[in-house]
Amino acid sequence: MTEPHILILGAGFAGFTLARALRRDAAAGRVRLTVVESQPYLTYKPLLPEVAGGETQPRDTVVPLHRPLKNAEVIAGALESVDTGAKVAVVRSLDGSERRVQYDHVVFALGAITKTLPIPGLADNAIGFSSVEEAAYLRDHVLERIRFAASTSDAAERKRALTFVFVGGGYTGVEAIAELQRLASSEIARYRELDGERMEWLLIEVAGRIAAELPEQLSAWTLRLLRRRGIRVLLKTEVKTVEHGAVVLSNGETHPADTLVWVAGVTPNPVLDRADVPRGPKGHVQCNARLQAVRDDGSTLDGVWALGDDAQVPDLTAEKQPAYYPPNAQNAIREARVLAENLRRAASGRELIEYRHRTLGTLASYGGMKGAAVVRGIPLRGPAAWAVDKVYHAIALPSLSRRFRLVLGWVGNGLTPRDAAPVGTVREPRARFREAAEAQSKAAARGE
């Protein structure tokens, strides 16, 4: 009997953890693993705001794939399509060639992309915040705009350069603007040419509060903290256009700005449109609690599984039903461990287990030894929340050497923003944002 071939699509938190959980099975010849991923590394995304703020080195947030996944075949490429009936996936390699991969089990762990809207000028002018390249680029861009402002005598150009607009008041947006504003405040103080000049930092949120993942009391505390730091938070406000170097808002304000950072949520990878899998109302693969893809009538697709940002997984522990787990790293890692066990059980014909997890809490770090958190139902704020956040991420980062460097960096950093060495972007990050916008525009045009 040949070992079952498990094809894992994606090597983010979910796919990487799953492949690592099955590494001994692969080494023993009980399964054959193939991982498809276009990037050569896993990015630890919770630390991206600290990369942007200069508190963490970019290299300490990425883990190269080949060494930890040495018992798997890692295909450097992107998924083109999946035929779940024939159990065949088509993968496009980096050199442009296509490869058909036959499998016994396929796991959708493709992750999410930045969610965009059809706002005039957005695709061409916004910067996303979902990769280490974008975070490092944004830090350098902010520092460069300050240097430019110090060098120009044109008051309008100076004001434009010193205006920074962030759209999206969830965790990512709040952490990113908090870290970058601290970095910029430290940097601008070095220029005598900018004495008396004020930077303008704007956080735009369509809802009635920011950091809505936190309890209302901590959300309100976060709002007060940002405003004390000089960040202007506009609630129940939308962006109307981003054209001709100006951001036009729904409240009638217009802000000339060189910097617009779009952190207004994510959406499942649109490549799912080319896979014949059942989808939920928001585009996720529809799953049962065993992480199997299921049709509307509850029947399962043979050998098709999903987890992480791609999956709509029912939360059977919630008091109010129906309920679904949020697509975050906490769930992705734990879902991967359950799925590894279920793949073993499926191979041996044993009963599958269900994914059940009560959240450990939520964490947010705002730099300067400030943060907000809920740990096992206990609300924390200030230095205590900041410390818990640091300990959690130091433990969760899947690389011992990087954990060590991370802690040394926090200690050596003196809790003050610094200029981290550039990661060296492969391409201008606005191209990544444009690709996400174009993919969603095409899907909308097709009526998907």
Image (tube, rainbow, N blue to C red):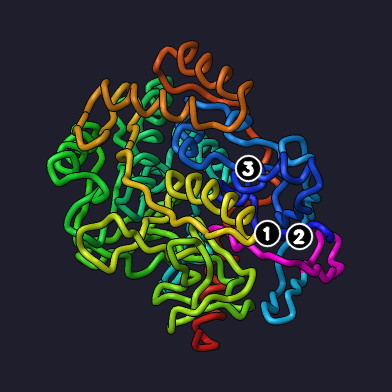
Disc 3 target residue: 21
Badge 2: residue crowd in 10 Å (few <14, some 14–19, many ≥20): some
Identity of the amino acid at label 1? Answer: Ala
Cα–Cα span, label 3 and label 2: 16 Å
Is 180 on the left or on the right of 323, as rendered? right
Disc 2 target residue: 4
Image spot of residue 418 (x, y percent): 49, 22
Image spot of residue 286 (x, y percent): 47, 72
Badge 3 marks a residue whose secondary structure is: helix
Above or below, comparing residue 339 to residue 416 in the picture? below
Identity of the amino acid at label 3? Answer: Ala
Disc 1 target residue: 347
Of the two numbered discs 1 and 2 on the same chain, state the one appearing first in sequence: 2
Cα–Cα span, label 3 and label 1: 15 Å
Above or below, comparing residue 338 to residue 102 in the picture? above
Image spot of residue 54 (x, y percent): 49, 28
